[in-house]
Image (cartoon, rainbow, N blue to C red):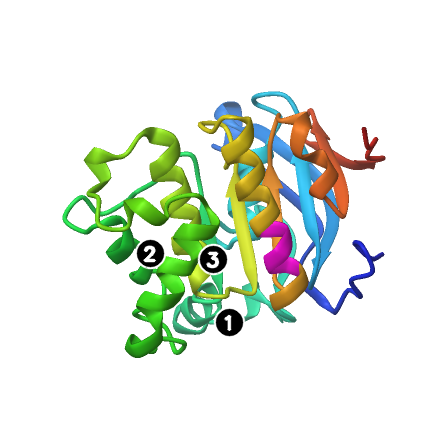
Amino acid sequence: MTSEGNTLGPAVVEAIDVHHHYGEGAQRVDVLFDINMQVREGELVIVTGPSGSGKTTLLTILGTMRRPSEGKLRLLGTNVSDINNAQLDRLRNRVRFLFQKRNLLSSLTALQNVVAGVSTTALAHPAWDEVRARHLLGLLGLGDKAESWPDELSGGQQQRVAIARVMIGLPDLIIADEPTSALDRVAGRLVVDQLQDLTMRAKCAVVLSTHDERIFDVASRRLHIEDGRCFEVPIHYH
């Protein structure tokens, strides 16, 4: 599948017969059943479903934040159950997470928070990181907020800073849980357009959960989770 002429590459993340539950015995609660899916380079996949359907659990499994109870997860061609913790940590360095809780460092300005997204990676280049960070903030409508502290920003502005911090490291995979939930229509559009651009230019893969039908048009595919089961549904463009 392609997105606006964008040729897709190999699978970045793949779930194979994944099942997940919490607790054991009488306390066991099954939340995911027989999940089979893959996301390839250059794809932005939207995940939808009602609250409690298993969306967040699936995202944390895809990002290796938790291991599935059963089944296999492959990240960048590697079966994560076959590697040790040090190897898994190296793989995780190629994944970035964007959740509803923004986790900005209060002691850093917006600009410094963005630079922190790349400063500990192999891509770090101090001479260019600030330039790139300012560029991203400008693209997200925050060019005049670079020197502001997090507590001087609105919730929506903080979310856009968090998104710039994720994007600056050019990850192979971005996992985003409701990234536009705190944003108005214009700001939300800026965010998803930049994520879509990242998939096309940097061959990044994005898995994004949302209830916001206004942003469905950026998706390569839409997956819907209901009662722990996942299936693909068509995207209706307006």
**Would you say the magenta stretch is mainly helix, strand or loop?**
helix
The reply to whether discs 1 and 2 touch (Cβ–Cβ < 8 Å) is no
**Dividing the picture into quarters, in which one does residue 38 lie?**
bottom right
* 196 in magenta: yes
Residue that lies at the very extreme toward the left in this rendered image:
107
Q: Quadrant location of the C terminus?
A: top right
Q: Residue at x 31, y 66 (%)?
A: 130
Q: Quadrant location of the N terminus?
A: bottom right
Q: Residue at x 39, y 38 (%)?
A: 159
Give the amino acid at mark 1: Ile
Give the amino acid at mark 3: Met
Q: Label 1 belongs to which residue?
A: 83
Which element type, helix, strand or loop, lies under badge 2? helix
| The disc label shown at residue 114, or none | 2
Number of residues whose C-alpha sits closer than 10 Å to that of mark 2, classed few (under 14), some (14–19) or many (20 or more) = many
Comparing 91 with 41, the one in front is 41
From the top left corner, tell me how far across and down residue 152 is, in percent. Answer: 21, 34
